[in-house]
Image (spheres, rainbow, N blue to C red):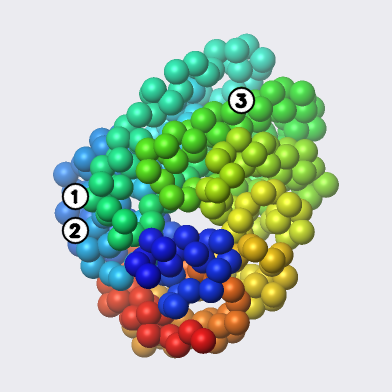
Amino acid sequence: MNARERFLNAASARPVDTRPVWLMRQAGRYLPEYRELRARHGFLEMVRTPALAAEVTLQPLRRFALDAAIIFSDILTIPEALGVPYTFREGGGILMEKALRSSADLDALQTQGLTERLNYVYDAIRSVRHALQDGHALLGFCGAPWTLAAYLVQGESQEGFPKLLALAKENPKMLERLLEILSQAAAAHLNAQIASGADAVQIFDSWGAVCPPDLYENFSLKWIRQIIGALPKDTPVILFAKGVDAREALWRSGARVLSFGADADMAREARLAPTGHAVQGNLDNRVLLEGPEATAAAAYALLEKTKDAPGYIFNLGHGVLPGTPVESIDALVRTVRQFPVA
């Protein structure tokens, strides 16, 4: 069984001979080859240039025995394709070219031709798929509508996204219209990624916890269901709703796999997963900063807790942190690969 088959079996909750290993946000400053590339090209330039995006996607697989690659891209490519570009602030965080304030702003969004403007993503996926052949799975992704709306309404990244919450209270009709536009755009984007060679896709509701729990169904989950319902039925969909404590509702989204942050009890989540579904996660990424020995010990402990879970996909609870030693990644992958699976 090759790495691609292992990953797809896991995403379908079928037992596999070894645990699939996938590190979210594989590219990063922990790889010297990435730093070398980053010194010559800006982040957005790499995202928008298929050859560079493909190279960054493939870099971790040349070093580590991972089962899957995730395409190097960004969730804000959809707002940009709709006509709202973004940049990174000097002090950190996202700055959108404008904030959406009125129905006229929604009318101005460029909904036609969206996938044509995102063709650089699909070119990168086709390139990576060709390079991987059948040896590894390839994942595409997008941001959930609520999370994308957070940036578009606030106009920037800001704790709590107060303008988004104000819009939800004061003008829910406008917000729902925006969410509908974003859900249609996300479905089109994911379908194009699948058609270009992505084996599975992930939806990131990174700011799901900002939504009041009693509003999460109406302003986030129903749009995620709409996206998943528009995808090919046999495509595994992974949902990461960061900080959202609504497991039963999340399982009803249509996602085959739920991904969890480091604060979740992974063994419990695996036990509660419906038949035919799988879980992914959730080693604390800060452990890797402590070095290879601490990383191996923490990874082994997590594997022990989840060893009876069918289709479990080992992953970090969040992305690899800057400054993470390459030796820690190597120790993590070796620990997972060597862990006995009944």
Which sits in the foreground, 142 or 257?
A: 257
Residue 68: x and y in percent read 38, 60
Q: Are marks 1 and 2 in contact (CB under 8 Å)?
A: yes
Q: Which circle, 1 or 3, is nearer the viewer?
A: 3
Q: Amino acid at mark 2?
A: Glu
Judge left or right: residue 146 versus residue 238: right
- Residue at left offset 50%, top offset 64%: 9
Which sits in the foreground, 127 or 102?
A: 127
- Residue at left offset 77%, top offset 44%: 217
Mark 1 = which residue?
37
Residue 178 appearing in the image:
yes
Secondary structure type for disc 2: helix
What is the CA distance from the residue labelled 1 to the residue labelled 2? 6 Å
Mark 3 = which residue?
181
Residue 35: x and y in percent read 22, 55
The numbered disc on residue 54 is none
Answer with mark 3 or mark 2, whichever residue precedes in sequence.
2
Secondary structure type for disc 1: helix
Q: Is residue 115 above or below residue 131?
A: above
Q: Is residue 15 above or below residue 145?
A: below
